[in-house]
Amino acid sequence: MVALESPEAFGGPKDDHGLSDPSISVVIPTRHEARTVGPFIRRVLSALPDEQAEVVVVDDSDDDTPSVLAELARELDRQLVVRHRPKGSVTERSLGSAVAEGIDIARAPHVCVMDADGQHPPEVVHTMLSAARMTGADYVGASRYVPGGSAEGLSGPSRKIASLLFAWLARVLFVCTPVRSLTDPLSGFFLFRRDIVAAVPLKPIGWKISLEILIRSRCERVTEVPYRFAPRTDDSSKASVRQGLLVLLHMAALLASLAGVRRMVAFTVVGVSGMCVNIAVLQMLAWLGQNAFGWPIWLATELSILWNYNLNRRITWRDRRFSTWWLYNLAAVVSALLAIGATELLVNDLLVPLWLGAMAGIASVTVLNYLWFDNLVFSTASWVERRTRVKVLVQV
Ligand code: GDD
Ligand code: MN
C-alpha cells in the first residue's frame, strides 16, 4: 500500500519531481475521476509526441482516484507528478486552490490547465502551445465562442446562458485589462507563460483561476484558439448556484484590487465627506445669523476643498510622493465655477429640470477634477524631476 498523501510516493520529494527539463506542464485538477483519469492522461501525453511533457495532477478525491493515479505514476515515472490532498490536509480543497497548487509545482516555461473529465480535448493543447510560441503571447485561451469552437457540451440552456453572461460581465468589468480581448475568459482550459505568474500569489475565490491569472499576473498579450467543449460522459458537473455566486464575489475582489478602481472609490467617498463639511459649516453660520449666500458660502467651499485635499493626499493618492496644494485649490475653484455655469446653462437655456441640471454639472466636473488631480496635482516625481526626465529622453 502506498502512502498516497506523501509526495514521495509519486516519484521523489517535492523538489525532485517531474522531468528535469520539461517543455510543457499540463496541470489537471481532479476530484472523483477514477473512471476517466487514467485514459485521459495517456491521451494528453500522446497528443504531445514532440514535447518533453509533464502532467501535474492535484487530486482532492475521496474515492479510488488516488490509487488509479498512484498506479499510473509508477508506470509513467517522471512524466506524471501527483499531489494528493486528503481531507483535512489543506485549509481548502477546491478546484481553484488545486489549480493554484498545480501551477506552483509546474516547471516548464509554458503551463496548460485543463479538466480531467474529457470535456477539454487534449489535441488542442498542441495548437495552444504553437500559438503561444508563434505569437509570443503570455496567455492563450481555448474558446468555445470563436469560429470553429462550440459550447454544445454545456448541460442545459441555463448553463449556456450563465456562461455567456459571465463572460460578457467579465469583459465589461475588466475592460482596462487583457480580459476585454477574450471571448471566453472564464474557461477552465488555457495556457500561459509561467514567468508571468512568478512571485504572484494566486488565491482565487471559487474556481475561475483564469481570471485570477489574467488580472493579477503580468499578462499583457493574449490570444485564443477555438475548441469544442465536449459533453460530460456522466452528468456530474460540480457547477452550482453557489459556484456562480462565488464567481461574482471573485470578480468584485479582483475589481477592488485594481489600482484605478480603488482610487475612484476613495475619491468618491472623500468627495461625499467634503460635501458634508461644506453643508455643516454653512448651516452653522446660518444659525449664527449670517446670510449664507454672502461670504459664508465661499468660506464653506474653501474649507471643504482643503478638507478634500488633505484626505485625498493621505488616502486616495497616498502612493504619490508629491502634491501641489495650490494647483488642487485652483482646479477645485475653477471646477466649482464651471459646475455652476453648466447647471445654469442646462436649466435656464435648455430647460432641463433643476435637479438633473445640478447633477449633470457636478458629475462633469467630478470627472474633470479626477483627471486633473491624477495627472497634475498628485505625482510620483517633483516638478524638477519631471523636467529632468524630459531632458534625459531628449539626450537618448
Ligand atoms: N482538485 C480538485 N478539487 N479538482 C476538482 C474539484 C475540487 O474540489 N472540483 C472539480 N474538480 C475537477 C474535476 O475533476 C474536473 O477535472 C475539473 O475540475 C472540472 O470540474 P467539472 O465539475 O467537470 O466542472 P465543469 O465541467 O462544470 O466546469 C468546467 O467548465 C467550465 C466552463 O464552463 C471547468 O473547467 C470550469 O473551470 C469552466 O469554467
Ligand atoms: Mn467538466
Image (cartoon, helix red, strand yellow):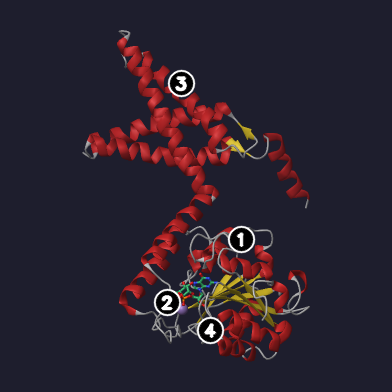
* Dot 1 amino acid type: Ser
For the residues labelled 4 and 3, the Cα–Cα distance comes to 69 Å
Is residue 377 among what the camera can see?
A: yes
Q: Residue furthest front?
A: 1
User: Considering depth in this image, is 191 or 367 the residue closer to the camera?
Assistant: 191
| Residue pictured at 42% horizontal, 59% vertical | 248
Residue 369 percent across, percent down from the top left: 47, 37
- Above or below, comparing residue 31 to residue 199 in the picture: below
First in sequence: mark 1 vs mark 2 = 1
- Residue marked by disc 1: 217
First in sequence: mark 3 vs mark 2 = 2
| Residue pictured at 49% horizontal, 31% vertical | 331
User: Considering depth in this image, is 98 or 106 the residue closer to the camera?
Assistant: 98
| Residue pictured at 60% horizontal, 86% vertical | 41
Q: Residue furthest top?
A: 289
- Residue marked by disc 3: 303
* Dot 2 amino acid type: Ser
Q: Is mark 1 within 8 Å of ligand 1?
A: no
Instruction: Give the structural element (helix, strand or loop) at label 3.
Output: helix
First in sequence: mark 4 vs mark 3 = 4
Instruction: Give the structural element (helix, strand or loop) at label 1.
Output: loop
For the residues labelled 1 and 2, the Cα–Cα distance comes to 28 Å
Q: Quadrant of residue 112?
A: bottom right
For the residues labelled 3 and 2, the Cα–Cα distance comes to 59 Å
First in sequence: mark 1 vs mark 3 = 1
Mark 3 or 2: the one toward you: 2
Q: Quadrant of residue 295?
A: top left
